[in-house]
Image (tube, helix red, strand yellow):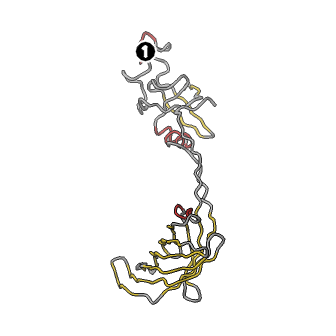
């Protein structure tokens, strides 16, 4: 068996390799190729030869079946099966871009809050569980970013058939410096996500903030939550714009 060395790989944009083992009468090696005798591509000595493609410890043996019109000199047009045998090439060539696992977004601690409630009003069994109306009657907010008192609000959360409570609350937060903040709270206990709305210039940054809170009932029967702002980082993503790899 004769071998050709392969140094560059290319995914053709115009056609894909086929699995037959001899060159057909069409879509074959170019009749004008210098290696084609008498203009008959089926007599080209490159037709049917085997090529071993290697990359980072992985290799695959392929057979010449036609010419890749879209590829450059020393490029190879590999079939999908051959690409899958070279894991790294599959990842890089068949994905729109390749990136490492993203880093988790950092959290900034905002405050801790205790929510107090009046007696609940039971709605009873509904299609997805049991629903109660919980009137939020007050509470305290203490933290490095926000300090104040909880005003009034309502939580119409749902307890599902597995016993997991999903809060769905809306209430006011009055800061010690006289700002009023509307708090929207949803989630699946003990995990809650929080959004804010305010007309205060000082706390206007809360209008675009997303917060995460965790907690639950404390010894007094109040709901105690620690609230963290999720800080988003926008990475620079480099897209692959080339289908061909440079020479190794």
Q: Which of 54 and 167 is in front in this view?
A: 167
Q: Where is residue 182 in the image (x, y as percent from the top left)?
A: 49, 71
73 vs 169, left or right, is right
Q: Residues within 10 Å of mark 1 (few under 14, many from 20)?
A: some
- In this view, the residue in front, 168 or 1, is 168
With respect to residue 135, does 98 lie above or below? above
Could you tell me which residue is drawn at 41 percent across and 22 percent down? Answer: 28
Name of the residue lying farthest toward the left: 127
Above or below, 210 against 134 in this view is above
Query: Compared to 191, does 209 lie above or below?
Result: above
Q: Is mark 1 on a helix, strand or loop?
A: loop
For the C terminus, the quadrant is top right
Residue that lies at the very extreme toward the top in this rendered image: 38
What residue is shown at x 63% (from left), y 40% (from top)? 57
What is the x, y in percent for residue 39? 42, 11
Most foreground residue, 180 or 33: 180
The percent coordinates of residue 230 (x first, y second) are: 58, 63
Q: Name the residue under label 1.
A: 31
């Amino acid at each position: 068996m004769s071998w050709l060395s392969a140094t560059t790989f290319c995914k053709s944009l115009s056609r894909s390799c086929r699995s037959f083992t001899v060159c057909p009468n069409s879509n074959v090696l170019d009749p004008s190729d210098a290696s084609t005798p008498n203009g008959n591509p089926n007599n080209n000595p490159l037709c049917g030869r085997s090529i071993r493609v290697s990359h980072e410890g992985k290799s695959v043996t392929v057979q010449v079946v036609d010419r890749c019109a879209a590829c450059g000199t020393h490029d190879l047009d590999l079939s999908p099966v051959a690409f899958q045998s070279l894991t790294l090439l599959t990842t890089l060539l068949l994905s729109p871009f390749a990136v490492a696992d993203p880093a988790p977004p950092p959290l900034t601690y905002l405050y801790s809050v205790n929510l107090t409630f009046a007696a609940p009003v039971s709605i009873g069994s509904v299609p997805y569980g049991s629903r109660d109306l919980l009137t939020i009657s007050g509470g305290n907010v203490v933290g490095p970013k926000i300090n104040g008192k909880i005003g009034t609000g309502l939580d119409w959360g749902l307890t599902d058939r597995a016993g997991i409570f999903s809060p769905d609350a809306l209430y006011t937060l009055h800061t010690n410096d006289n700002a009023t903040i509307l708090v929207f709270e949803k989630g699946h206990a003990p995990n809650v996500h929080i959004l804010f709305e305010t007309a205060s210039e000082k706390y206007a940054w809360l209008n675009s903030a997303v917060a995460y809170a965790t907690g639950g009932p404390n010894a007094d029967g109040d709901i105690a939550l620690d609230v963290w702002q999720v800080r988003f980082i926008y990475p620079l993503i480099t897209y692959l714009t080339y289908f061909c790899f440079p020479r190794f």
